[in-house]
Image (tube, coloured by chain):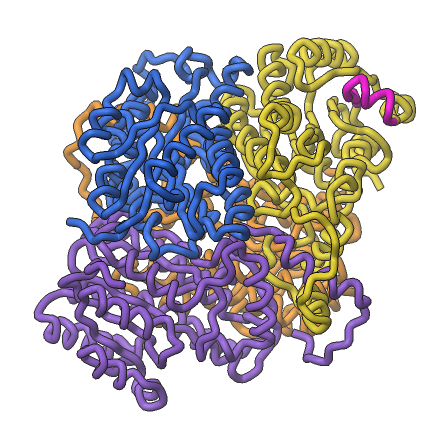
Chain colours: A blue, B purple, C orange, D yellow
């Protein structure tokens, strides 16, 4: 069901890799809600994923860009404005990757060149998009910018590694630039801290399914799905949330405000009944 | 402009006193978005304010109820369900009053009977609404409940007095009951922490205009208005925010994430230039 | 080992029931660190517990007082100052009790008279101590006041019931009164949010042992003990923490900053291996 | 006055440039409390500042090291352990610098190579110290590690620039590594979020004196001094705070929990009385 919440708006979406991507679902719903869309991804992701397919489906322009490259971003923003015939109303940043995680470096054995890459890809890219947009005056007054985050920015999850630090920085950038862009152009900048989600990115994380189970039992409403996250993004892009800025918005079925649910405790207790000797063989993480 | 976001939904709204009330504006917008409405207020407020007028305007039923009385709430909920021909989809709690503030008792000279009244009116009433609703199974699955709060729940503002403690408790009730009502009926419960707003309630607070000025200069988007707050309530009542629960959502133009803006500092500095001897004569608060 | 951290200081301690009480251990350590002590508890608790025994052990005066009674508090503070021959340097509030929990009322079936009692005993009593102290000018400049809290003030734990709302209010009172007493007398007011602890109070909570196990596995340093909590109280009473005020200080082995530890997840996973059908028979909480 | 709180302990202190440095005062007090000290700073800072002088004063060894260089850190830690004849009990990280601020790049015109330097110097260095320490097993069981932070990690202060993002990341590293080092060696890792302080670093920030004035009037206890911060560091290094970890501890006279004080509002109001036209000529920041 559509409401015309984004009628006439123009949106730029980073990170729609395939049907599992939150960004994919945001693009689809934004279109349904009346928006014109530009999709972007790195050239490699465009080859590996299905972004072009989505572009055809939505009548969206697909523009390759590495979000860590100012040159690419300048080109992306200019081409987007040309395609739209005007400035951009909303932007979604759904980008995150840790080469340290990929290469199996534990958080206590980080490769520091790779850490800077994690930061550049997952956090600084957000600043680069904002700074380049501001220089080109590419975002319409009262525009809305979102980045997707995770509660690891506030609390430590084993195995999440240097992505936790990157997400903390990402949320800080939303605040820092939200101040600048807000006072100058009334542009609001927020992050949505989403439940763990079985996307291509999420599925790479160790023990992810059990973490999903825990989250689901802890959260009174269960984990939030990618589809539901897309709904939340739509309202944050709409004109009904104009004064919400510099916030990190938990979209997680209540997980962030839970200490312990009965359902999760019951499951935990079953483990206790069966003894506490460890019989799993995963690598210490 | 309306989107049909609440088409077919039924909402119960506490605290629509007059045109300045946030609850008033929520009722008007909810109606525009397709909802049926029941308005409620205490018998005294119904006589003093214009709730009945609003009822006529919106074709809404007006039911008197003291939100601290279980009997009144039972009657209210039953009559509402009769009027609607079914369960309630959303509830707005916009109730707050401190008899200590009214009677001029400083926070360090509280009357403790009045403190319990502040708590009963401004916080426990929220629990009473929820508990009574649950007993009568009055809220539809996936319903949405909101209460209006203020950042004094987290940070101390001189003169806000025992309302700060009441708002802290209000936000805690939203979490505590959000867990219960979420796991059982998927009902979500949140608070919106709104900018200081020039309502009838707000205008009673000492030095309120200057506080508004400070908030406006600190917030990159300026203070959020009552109208904008109503917009935010609408999206929180809509089906697009189903997995947001147990949250306190700042709707304040960015104020909550600011330490110091240049605009507020400039104003402050002007005060410094003119000397730091105190030349105001208000009572120490 | 003692450091003379409280040499010459005078402390008033609420809630030292027996050897398991955190307040008991604070009293013992405060004495070791050079303080003179007054102990207080309700007349009933004095009969049931061992406070008088502790008084003899420490050469401390024991003064009966119901912390919800202004009259009792006035008497307590006056007698304390007489005993000390001067003002009080530090106060510990370790008081909490929910008649709703005692009588088995679920959070969705609260007795509201009992809720007001929970609040009066567990939160408002803190305000009463502070307000009465201020009126009698009973606390020395740069004095330090602590109350013991729990993370349920921020996150929902099943079964913690209306104590969660009371703790939220308690922490708010620490901030609100911390502002007043700080600006006037440089008195600092903080709460310590302690790990779940096997005291007489703690042991009454349903499923408490398993919650302790979970906390212990989640916290990188394990749960904090009552003894360790007493150490932390000592430093907060000492002259080395003079500018810390209006804070809620987590003393929990890291629990509050954890999302998921490997150790807790391992235990949880064992429950998963053994199927997810529920085979416990406790009452739904 | 000394208490022997650090008797027999061995501490490594980064960033003691001159008498104004917080790290300087920590070193002096740690010595008074019975600790042996190693001081370290970059070779440039050793030439420009007075670290060597302090070394002589305290009988401390001074070892040059660039905290962004793993090689330097390895050497530093090995030499420290040799000097101490054993492992290190506590570490203070008091390092922060933004080349973007130095070169006058506004936050909306960052040089991204310099941003990575800001991060490397001000945040990643903390990880490098911890990772290298862990690899060399250089920290004693139950050791304590602190880094100095600022509330800009949570709230935006104009002009604080990319240091805000660096401090957010620094605090995240404290949590992430606090989990690892806690579970393995019971080492606790915290940050202290200190009032703005007139150190050599602080004095470079634009409009810093007025910000100090505002902080002082907002905080019920006034701004915390460098001396008082050193006191707080001592207790966090002592055995009395063993279970406090992964926390950001505000040491700020109450500033972080204030929304508005009467004293700050009075000053602000004076600015209002004198008109709101801007008559300052600083560059928009």
User: Image quadrant for the N terminus of chain D?
Assistant: top right
Instruction: Verify whether residue D43 appears in magenta.
Output: yes
Query: Going by the image, does D124 lie left or right of B139?
Result: right
Q: Is residue D60 above or below residue A215?
A: above
Identify the residue at image location x=51%, y=57%.
Answer: B154
Q: From the viewer's perspective, is residue C205 above or below residue D166? A: below
In the figure, residue C187 lies in which quadrant?
bottom right
* Relative to D241, C18 lies left or right: left
Residue D102 point in image, percent of width and height: 72, 33
Which of these two is toward me, D191 or A22? A22
Q: Does residue C46 appear left or right of residue D235 in this picture?
A: left
- Whether residue C216 is visible, yes or no, is no
Residue occupying the point 76% across, 24% down: D8
Residue at the image position 73 percent from the left and 61 percent from the top: D279
Q: Out of A207 and A84, give the one closest to the viewer.
A: A84
Residue B146 on the magenta segment: no
Residue stretch in magenta = D37-49
The quarter of the picture where residue C250 lies is top right
Residue at the limit of the structure toward the left, as seen here: B85
Q: Vertically, is B234 above or below D42? A: below
Task: Work out whether residue D259 can be spotted.
Answer: yes
Q: Which x, y percent locates residue B216? A: 55, 63
Query: In x, y percent, where is residue C273?
Result: 21, 23
């Amino acid at each position: 069901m559509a409401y015309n919440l984004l009628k006439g708006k123009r949106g730029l979406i980073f990170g729609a890799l395939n049907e599992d991507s939150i960004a994919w679902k945001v693009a689809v719903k934004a279109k349904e809600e009346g928006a014109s869309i530009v999709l972007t991804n790195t050239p490699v992701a465009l080859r590996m994923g299905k972004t072009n397919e989505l572009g055809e489906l939505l009548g969206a322009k697909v523009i390759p860009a590495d979000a860590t490259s100012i040159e690419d971003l300048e080109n992306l923003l200019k081409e987007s404005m040309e395609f739209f015939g005007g400035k951009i109303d909303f932007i979604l940043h759904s980008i995150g990757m840790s080469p340290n995680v990929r290469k199996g470096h534990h958080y206590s054995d980080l490769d520091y060149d790779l850490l800077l890459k994690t930061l550049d890809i997952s956090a600084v890219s957000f600043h680069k998009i904002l700074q380049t947009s501001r220089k080109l005056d590419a975002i319409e007054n009262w525009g809305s910018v979102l980045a997707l985050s995770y509660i690891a920015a506030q609390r430590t999850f084993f195995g999440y590694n240097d992505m936790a630090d990157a997400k903390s920085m990402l949320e800080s950038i939303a605040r820092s630039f939200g101040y600048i862009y807000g006072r100058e152009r009334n542009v609001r900048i927020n992050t949505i801290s989403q439940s763990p989600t079985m996307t291509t990115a999420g599925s790479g994380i160790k023990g992810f399914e059990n973490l999903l189970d825990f989250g689901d039992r802890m959260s009174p409403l269960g984990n939030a799905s990618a589809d539901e996250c897309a709904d939340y993004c739509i309202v944050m892009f709409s004109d009904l949330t104009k004064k919400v800025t510099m916030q990190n918005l938990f979209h997680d079925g209540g997980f962030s405000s839970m200490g312990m649910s009965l359902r999760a405790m019951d499951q935990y207790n079953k483990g206790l009944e069966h003894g506490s000797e460890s019989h799993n063989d995963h690598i210490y993480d």
